[in-house]
Image (spheres, helix red, strand yellow):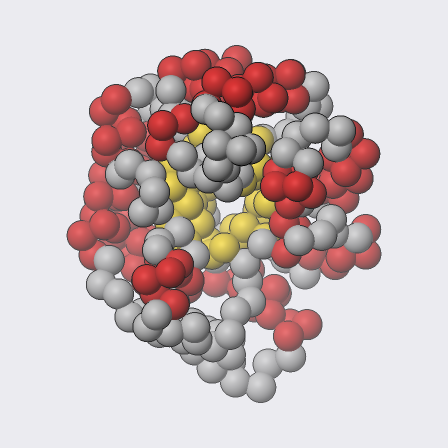
């Protein structure tokens, strides 16, 4: 049976001490504690800099055998150079990721919206993307996230499917709801699916920037995501899902709520084993 692994986007945040991590716990112990609660994490820090060998080895040593790390590709590749002339950055990134061994879940290429100056349309983006993904090394699970709904086309999905790259299904105000995506397309483009519950950053930061409690009721949206996960799970496809603090205010609580609903709705599924 395919796994459903759910965690947070990053394992540290303002407000988590006392709300998630025991008060007084040393930050050096956070990851070990986190890995006793959840079975996967999306590492946000790798977006800002390629992890050092020491860092990757420490992550590996602090987590149990079943734990899975998903890494966000460094922004130099996705936002600054946008897949052009970035072979060296990719090689360095993959070398660091390799140190996680069997604990490496997926590598996410998260792209911004991109204005017309960057790419006039989705076809222009594909002209850049397709040669790049054809050069990606084998042996990794890759996911790709776009934030322009007009770029969500059969041609994009075909390009991802040919290279077995998962389209990231995201909960974001700029993108269509998951049910709409799955009703319009066969959006499952790999042997695993990558889900991100991102939320509306601008709206929630008007209410809080201390992520110690849930401040937005997301029960309706979570029920919708559970139905989406159920449909994907029926295809016996592994799911990696991550929740951001901006989704409801406190990602660990939302993860626990989502896990509880999934275990109730899918009692035979391997959820966060």
Q: Is residue 249 above or below residue 164?
A: below
Q: Nearer the viewer, residue 160 or 229?
A: 160
On the question of residue 59 being in view, the answer is yes
Residue found at the very far front of the displayed protein: 117
At 40% from the left and 34% from the top, the residue drawn is 148
Q: Residue 234, located in which quarter of the rendered image?
A: top left
Q: Residue 237 location in percent, x, y?
A: 41, 28
Horizontally, residue 15 falls left or right of residue 230, namely right
Q: Nearer the viewer, residue 74 or 29?
A: 74
At 55% from the left and 33% from the top, the residue drawn is 118
At 57% from the left and 17% from the top, the residue drawn is 127
Q: Residue 98, located in which quarter of the rendered image?
A: top right
Q: Residue 33 location in percent, x, y?
A: 56, 68
Q: Residue 155 location in percent, x, y?
A: 43, 14
At 69% from the left and 56% from the top, the residue drawn is 59
Horizontally, residue 86 falls left or right of residue 27, namely right
Residue found at the very far left of the displayed protein: 220
Quadrant for the N terminus in the image? top left
């Amino acid at each position: 049976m395919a796994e459903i692994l759910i965690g947070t986007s990053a394992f540290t945040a303002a407000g988590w001490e006392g709300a998630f991590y025991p008060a007084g716990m040393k930050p050096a112990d956070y990851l070990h504690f986190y890995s006793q609660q959840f079975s996967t994490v999306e590492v946000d820090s790798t977006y800002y800099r390629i992890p050092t060998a020491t860092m990757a080895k420490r992550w590996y040593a602090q987590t149990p055998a079943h734990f899975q790390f998903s890494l966000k590709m460094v922004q130099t590749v996705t936002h600054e150079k946008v897949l052009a002339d970035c072979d060296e950055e990719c090689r360095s990134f993959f070398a660091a990721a390799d140190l996680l061994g069997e604990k490496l879940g997926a590598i996410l290429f998260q792209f911004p919206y991109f204005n017309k100056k960057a790419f006039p349309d989705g076809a222009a983006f594909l002209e850049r993307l397709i040669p790049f993904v054809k050069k990606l090394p084998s042996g990794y699970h890759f996911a790709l996230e776009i934030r322009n709904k007009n770029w969500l086309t059969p041609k994009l999905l075909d390009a991802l499917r040919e290279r077995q790259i998962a389209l990231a299904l995201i909960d974001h105000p700029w993108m269509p709801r998951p049910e709409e995506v799955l009703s319009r397309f066969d959006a499952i483009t790999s042997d695993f699916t990558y889900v991100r519950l991102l939320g509306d950053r601008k709206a929630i930061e008007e209410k809080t920037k201390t992520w110690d409690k849930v401040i937005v009721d997301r029960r309706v949206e979570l029920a919708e995501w559970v139905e989406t996960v159920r449909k994907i799970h029926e295809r016996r496809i592994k799911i990696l899902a991550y929740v951001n603090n901006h989704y409801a205010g406190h990602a660990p609580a939302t993860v626990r709520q989502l896990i509880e609903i999934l275990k109730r709705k899918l009692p035979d599924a391997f959820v966060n084993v």
